[in-house]
Image (cartoon, coloured by chain):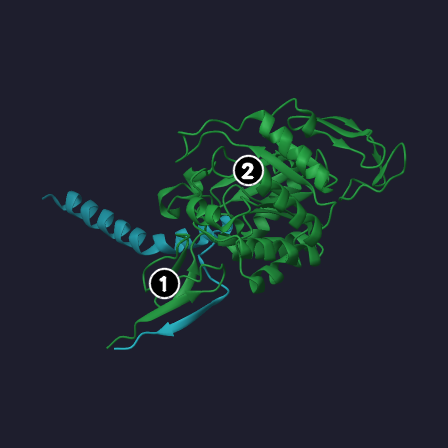
Amino acid sequence: MKDRHLVICELCPKNCSIPDGQSGDCRVRVNMGGKLIAVTYGRPCSIHIDPMEKKPLFHFLPSTPIFSIATAGCNLHCKNCQNWQISQANPYDIDNFNLSPKMIVNLAIRKSCQSIAYTYSEPTVFYEYVYDTAVYARERGIKNVLVTAGYINPKPQKKICRYIDASNTDLKGFNEGFYRSNCFATLRPVLDGMVIAREMGVWLEITNLVIPTLNDDLTEVRRMCKWIKKNLGDYIPLHFSRFHPQYRLRNLPPTPLNFLRNARKEAMNTGLKYVYIGNVIGEDGENTYCPNDGKLLIGRIGFTITAYSIINGRCKVCNEKIEGVWKS
Amino acid sequence: MKRKTRRNFFRNSLISLVGIFLSPLKRDSAREEKGFQEPKEADFYKRHKLAG
């Protein structure tokens, strides 16, 4: 009788047991005769050149273009997903390019991009492709950026973090119940992952999408900010992002601007130095201010930089050190 | 069938057959040129043999 093999994927905390011929929860890691195959390796479905501010990364090479790629699949299934057409798709159902890691890096160089983002869907599930591309990019002097939900096991994360320069981690909320019911994941591994990333020298920024009635609780915001300050540092930029009705949450309204402003105020009262409001154009919360003298350091309208007063990583006026990775 | 028609028929069949056998080779070399990636074996998993 032919052997039947289960494989147990150890990439993310879901640790899927996958029977022969089937895929894990992410749809893109398939058991083929007892071998786990990453079927989206070399098959990006989205390739764009974006401004760095779109990731959002506000303290990492501001206003530079970043070569951004994604493949199909995600290990989370957020009801509010903005890119559900690719993240929740079967990789065989959408159009993909065929591009080796070397071709991605060469394309980024040809397009004058200093960095590559693994973004749009979830880079965790195209781990091998990210890793090979990141290793080659590092050799060629290109920086690597993860835009991720951070739902990954410690061992693979530590391996890849050696080649990652910056990460925007989506901290979707600060309670387990919300993570389970809205994202089909858990909170603890995300928090542990952010601590690992910071310890390994990855420049970290955090995005928190505020969804009305689901995670718009100022007490929870306060607890989250205190945790960030205590475990990661007060200099970690935090972006409160506005929700727009999407995917399975079209019944909810956009986040009221007042809540975002109050959340920002609350976060700054907790002691976080750089707190932003995202997905809103023309807000004061888009700008970076000096934590020492309160002067405008970087003015932004959407993805456009309107003012820039940082020299050698310091405030032009008071010489206060501004944490981040700045253009030399 | 006239002799000339028959000869053309056999010649065309032969060309088609050769083409069919050669096309995978052609496709493979085109894949190499364009950097085609075969799916890759994943890192971080373990096998678990089922009983029975």
* Mark closer to the chain start, 1 or 2: 1
Discs 1 and 2 carry the same chain letter: yes
Amino acid tagged 2: Asp
The residue where tag 2 is placed is A217
Farthest-out residue, top: A282
Q: Please identify, in this view, whether the residue under mark 1 or under mark 2 is nearer the observer.
A: 2
Q: Nearer the viewer, residue A150 or A52?
A: A150
Q: Which chain is cyan?
A: B
Residue A107: x and y in percent read 60, 43
Q: In the rendering, at what x and y percent does residue A70 appear?
A: 51, 44
Report whether A7 appears left or right of A226: left
> In this orientation, which residue lies closer to the viewer: B33 or A53?
A53
Image coordinates of residue B15 in percent, x first then y, are: 28, 50
Pointer 1 indicates a residue of which chain?
A
Label 2: state its secondary structure: loop
Q: Is residue A250 visible?
A: yes
Element type at mark 1: strand
Colour in which chain A is shown?
Answer: green
Q: On the rendered image, what quadrant is the N terminus of chain A found in?
A: bottom left
Mark 1 sits on what residue? A18
From the top left corner, tell me how far across and down residue A314 is, in percent: 85, 39
Residue positioned most to the left? B1
Quarter of the image holding residue B18?
bottom left
Q: Chain of mark 2?
A: A
Q: Give the label on residue A150, or none.
A: none
Identify the image quadrant of the C terminus of chain A: top right
Residue A58 visible to an observer of this rendering = no
In the displayed structure image, the side of residue A317 where residue A218 appears, left or right: left
- The kind of residue tagged 1 is Ile
Mark 1–mark 2 Cα distance, whole angstroms, equals 38 Å
Q: Is residue A234 above or below residue A263?
A: below
Number of labels in the image equals 2
